[in-house]
Amino acid sequence: MNVLVTGGAGYIGSHVVAVLHAAGHHPVVLDNFSHSRPEVVQKLERLTGAKIPLVQADVRDDQAVLTALKIHEVEAVIHLAGLKVVGESFTDPLEYYEVNVHGTAVLARALEAAGVFHLVFSSSAAVYGKSDTLPVNESQRLDPAHPYGRSKWHAEQILADLAASDERWHLVGLRYFNPVGCHPSVLIGEAPSEIASNLMPAVARVAAGWQSEVEVFGQDYPTVDGTGVRDFIHVMDLAQGHLTALDYLVQHSGWDVFNLGTGRGVSVLELIAAFEQACGHSLAYRIASRRPGDIAASFADVTKAHQILGWVARHDLADQCASAWAWQQALSAAPS
Ligand SMILES: NC(=O)c1ccc[n+]([C@@H]2O[C@H](COP(=O)([O-])OP(=O)(O)OC[C@H]3O[C@@H](n4cnc5c(N)ncnc54)[C@H](O)[C@@H]3O)[C@@H](O)[C@H]2O)c1
């Protein structure tokens, strides 16, 4: 299929493009490069050995999107273009609603005009917020703890309403847990400018000597060791999940959501210990106070994705740390 990948130059999008190409699809990247660089697309071309068509546009630019859909004869869209930094969403909520919610509505309108009714939407485990029960399953009450999570929730609601209004729509939302690691080629990964607030890259920076210690936000949570517990998922597993969702979409109309995680909760201290194994030396950390919007624990019930999509994450924590360390070493070796 010809698949438009919005946000295709970003961290997850670039891996989705690589996996789509490897599966025989024809990905087209649409990105405004607000949080990525055009070089990523060149790297994707090196990696795939194929020309990857690129549309530099904002997803809120309906005419540009419509033109891209027509010119590239797009049959399905994977919509990853969005903003994702929780802290920033508290200080600039409007920007988050404009890009993540309005952007999704504009895209959907353009799809309708072009007669393209197949869409995979990049949602987040952040839609759950503080969960009543763990692991978190898809039918759980949604109660996002911050504007970012609420923006994803609203975008999901738009898509659910759309599917209910017209049976031509085939829509799937993927609720990602915490993506980490990079492509096995180590050519693409998470951009260093984008990683400040995520744990794994922060740990990798300490391992590389870029930072003196890992800040651990809170050690008084009701968890195994008092630190936050999350479900880390290798970005290649996540990218693979999009392929299976695309296969599913072709067969199924309506709207549905799936968790993409490993199903295993890992504490911050457990992750640091696993990374020490990967990099071969100990890592300094310091306990800091909790951050606004953080919750104690979140990990996925992945039964639905397994049973309906036939998808399961294959990479364990050791693989994830090895991959994140390989990427950090590549960044360290790159000329600044
Ligand atoms: N990384 C995570 O931890 C995580 C977790 C859950 C969900 N998500 C969601 O997955 C998606 C991709 O995340 P990522 O980690 O790859 O982030 P990223 O910032 O690396 O990628 C997002 C891409 O979208 C582009 N973009 C942003 N606004 C745009 C706009 N208005 N028009 C066109 N392009 C635009 C950026 O330039 C970037 O290339 C996001 O929607 C994010 O909310 C990410």
Image: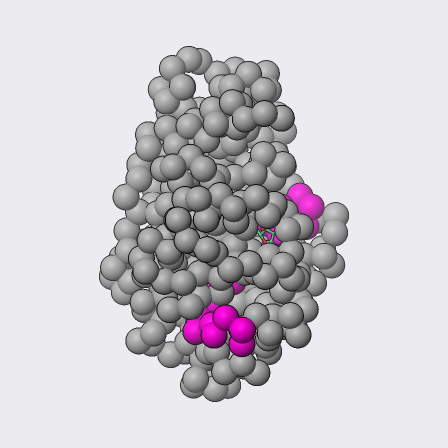
Compared with 97, 165 (above or below) is below
State the quadrant of the C terminus: top right
- The answer, for residue 26, to whether it is visible in the render is yes
Give the camera-side residue of 236 and 254: 236
Q: Is residue 239 left or right of residue 189?
A: left
Q: Is residue 225 left or right of residue 87?
A: left
- Residue at left 41%, top 24%? 275
Give the camera-side residue of 150 and 163: 163
Task: Using the rendered view, name the quadrant where residue 107 is placed.
Answer: bottom right
Residue 63 in picture, x, y percent from top left: 66, 74
- Residue at left 38%, top 15%? 280
Outermost bottom residue: 166
Compared with 325, 75 (above or below) is below
- Residue at left 42%, top 68%? 2
Give the camera-side residue of 18 and 309: 18
The count of marks equals 0
Task: Using the rendered view, name the quadrant where residue 169 is placed.
Answer: bottom left
Residue 81 in picture, x, y percent from top left: 57, 58
- Residue at left 54%, top 26%? 334
Residue 317 in picture, x, y percent from top left: 34, 33
Q: Is residue 314 left or right of residue 331?
A: left
Q: Is residue 88 magenta?
A: yes
Compared with 124, 200 (above or below) is above
- The answer, for residue 80, to whether it is visible in the render is no
Q: Which residues are magenta?
A: 69-89
Q: Is residue 300 magenta?
A: no
